[in-house]
């Protein structure tokens, strides 16, 4: 039976590296994204040219109707999902808490916490044995700042990632008996558009003296999705250059 994966925010960065590796391993892939059609369609075409199966679906994970529509498209075009990577997130401009607007904080939490929550809910409905599914795997993409906070820059973002981590643990305990393993990765600074302006710091703050690559995070995500990680549930795996 073919594995079917949804990678939210799969068109760029860590998500795109995960999409490529999943396609190489024979998954049919839904590349979710928000608005950059070109990047998503280019990646979809690359996967299809390489002999894989992929669709690109624009859906804002912070909007419930979008998420419901995306899962319905996947049901129809690929089949019921067997793996979900909750990767999409936003990191707004650096600011101290005293300057953060309600709207900014609301958008961060809606995208980075409620989005993955609703995606996980829809995936579980399709994966859970008690709902007629065959089990599945969910990997959430957290961040090292869930441990340390992000003072003067993004304490909203770090708070959202801490929430995602406890959701990972709680969900793992809730759905393991349903045949669903839920885990997370916790990257430090990774060479993507999201932190392009901060990369110069990487050499000084990481014992490995460099930022990570999207592929290095994707490798860990793929491992958590695989049978090699069959006894990992509720784990949060650091991929952080030793930081
Ligand atoms: P990125 O390069 O900025 O790519 C973000 C992806 O998410 C794009 O595909 C984007 O789609 C999509 N996206 C953004 N908002 C969305 C929404 N509301 N609905 C659906 N898709 C949305 O990001 P990245 O650096 O690869 O980060 C991926 C994950 O790793 C995030 O969870 C991030 O918090 C985490 N992380 C990153 C780092 C790092 O240093 N890069 C470190 C720790 C953790 P569009 O192109 O259409 O906008």
Image (cartoon, helix red, strand yellow):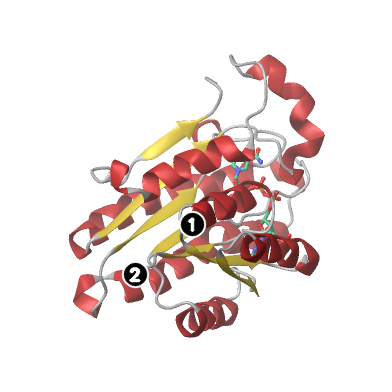
Q: Residue placed at 78% from the left, 46% from the top?
A: 93
Quarter of the image for residue 136 reads: bottom left
The quadrant in which residue 151 appears is top right
- Check whether the beta carbons of the residues at disc 2 and disc 1 lie within 8 A of each other: no
Q: Quadrant of the C terminus?
A: top right
Q: Image quarter for residue 38? A: bottom right
Taking 116 as reference, is 63 above or below it? below
Quadrant for the N terminus in the image:
bottom left
State yes or no: Cβ of the residue under disc 1 lies below 8 Å from any atom of ligand 1. Answer: no
Mark 1, secondary structure of its residue: strand
Residue 130 screen position, x and y as percent: 19, 75
The reply to whether residue 146 is visible in this rendering is no
Q: Which mark is residue 85?
A: 1
x 69%, y 43%: residue: 97
Query: How far, Cα to Cα, is label 2 from label 1?
Result: 13 Å
**At numbered mark 2, what does the secondary structure look like: helix, strand or loop?**
helix
The percent coordinates of residue 24 (x first, y second) are 52, 52
How packed mark 2 is, by other alpha carbons closer than 10 Å (few <14, some 14-19, many 20 or more), is many
Q: Position of residue 68 (x, y in %)?
A: 51, 81
Residue 33 position within the rendered picture, expressed as x and y whole percent measured from the top left: 66, 65
Q: Which residue is mark 2?
A: 124
The answer to whether residue 27 is above or below residue 190 is below
Q: Nearer the viewer, residue 116 or 133?
A: 133
Q: Nearer the viewer, residue 18 or 8?
A: 18
Near mark 1 (Cα within 10 A), the count class, few <14, some 14-19 or many ≥20, is: many
The residue at the point 58 percent across, 42 percent down is: 158
Residue at x 27% of width, y 65% of height: 135
144 on left or right of 220: right
Task: Check mark 2 vs ligand 1: CB closer than 8 Å? yes or no.
Answer: no
């Amino acid at each position: 039976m073919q594995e079917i994966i949804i990678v939210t925010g799969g068109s760029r960065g860590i998500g795109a590296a995960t999409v490529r590796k999943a396609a190489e391993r024979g998954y049919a892939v839904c590349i979710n994204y928000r608005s950059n059609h070109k990047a998503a369609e280019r990646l979809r075409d690359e996967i299809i040219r390489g002999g894989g199966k992929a669709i690109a679906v624009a859906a804002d994970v912070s909007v419930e109707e979008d998420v419901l529509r995306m899962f319905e498209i996947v049901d129809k075009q690929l089949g019921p999902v067997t793996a979900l990577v909750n990767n999409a997130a936003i990191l707004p401009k650096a600011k101290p808490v005293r300057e953060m607007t309600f709207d900014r904080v609301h958008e961060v939490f809606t995208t980075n916490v409620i989005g993955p929550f609703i995606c996980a809910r829809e995936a579980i409905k399709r994966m859970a044995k008690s709902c007629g599914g065959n089990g599945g795997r969910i990997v959430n993409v957290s961040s090292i700042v869930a441990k340390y906070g992000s003072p003067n820059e993004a304490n909203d973002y770090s708070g959202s990632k801490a929430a995602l981590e406890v959701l990972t643990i709680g969900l793992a305990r809730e759905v393991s008996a349903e045949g669903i393993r839920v885990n997370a990765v916790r990257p430090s600074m990774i060479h993507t558009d999201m932190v392009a302006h901060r990369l110069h710091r990487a050499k000084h703050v990481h014992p490995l003296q460099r930022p990570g690559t999207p592929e290095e995070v994707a490798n860990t995500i793929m491992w958590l999705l695989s049978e090699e990680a069959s006894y990992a549930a509720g784990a949060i795996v650091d991929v952080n250059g030793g930081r």
